[in-house]
Image (spheres, rainbow, N blue to C red):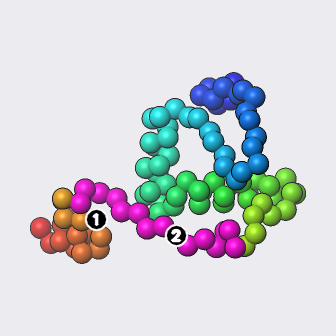
Amino acid sequence: MLHGHVMLHHMARGESGRIVVEIDPAEKQELYDALTRDGMTLKDWFLRRAGEYLRERGQGQLFGADVLAEAKVPYRVGNPTSGGSGEKAKAKRMAR
């Protein structure tokens, strides 16, 4: 057992670039909420942490610069019916 939440089992390792991890749904939501607040995607976060981990272990770079330089995907947070979540909506709320 790892961290009290993850059971380690034999996991299939295919040839694709996909990594599949099963976690508690509440922790998944908490992680996505935190990443959204920080303006990151799960992929951004994972690539950064995996790269740091491998560098610390002296294993070099995980992915080439072209993969790390991927364009950011814009995410919107908030209820679209509440007046939006951008700077204009923020200014509008502050003026109230």
Left or right relative to 27: residue 15: right
- Residue 80 x/y as whole percent: 23, 60
Q: Residue at x 49, y 40 (%)?
A: 28
Name the residue tied to disc 1. 85
Left or right relative to 50: residue 86: left
Res. 8 in view: yes
Q: How crowded is mark 2: few (under 14 residues within 10 Å), some or many (20 or more)?
A: few
- Residue 14 x/y as whole percent: 75, 43
Mark 1, secondary structure of its residue: loop
Up-down: is 7 above or below 74? above
* Viewer-side residue, 64 vs 27: 64
Q: Residues within 10 Å of mark 1 (few under 14, many from 20)?
A: some
Q: Residue type at mark 2? A: Lys
Please tell me in which quadrant of the rendered image residue 94 appears. Answer: bottom left
Q: Residue at x 64, y 73 (%)?
A: 69
- Residue 31 x/y as whole percent: 50, 46
Mark 2, secondary structure of its residue: loop
Q: Residue type at mark 1? A: Ser
Name the residue tied to disc 2. 72
Res. 94 in view: no
Left or right relative to 21: residue 76: left
* Viewer-side residue, 62 vs 91: 62
Mark 1 vs mark 2: give the one in front.
2
Q: Which residue is drawn at 86% across and 57% down?
A: 59
| Callouts 1 and 2 close, C-beta under 8 Å | no
User: Rounded to the nearest whole Å, what is the CA distance between mark 1 and mark 2?
Assistant: 18 Å
Residue range (magenta): 66-80
Please tell me in which quadrant of the rendered image residue 96 appears. Answer: bottom left
Assess whether residue 76 is covered by the magenta stretch.
yes
Up-down: is 83 above or below 66? above
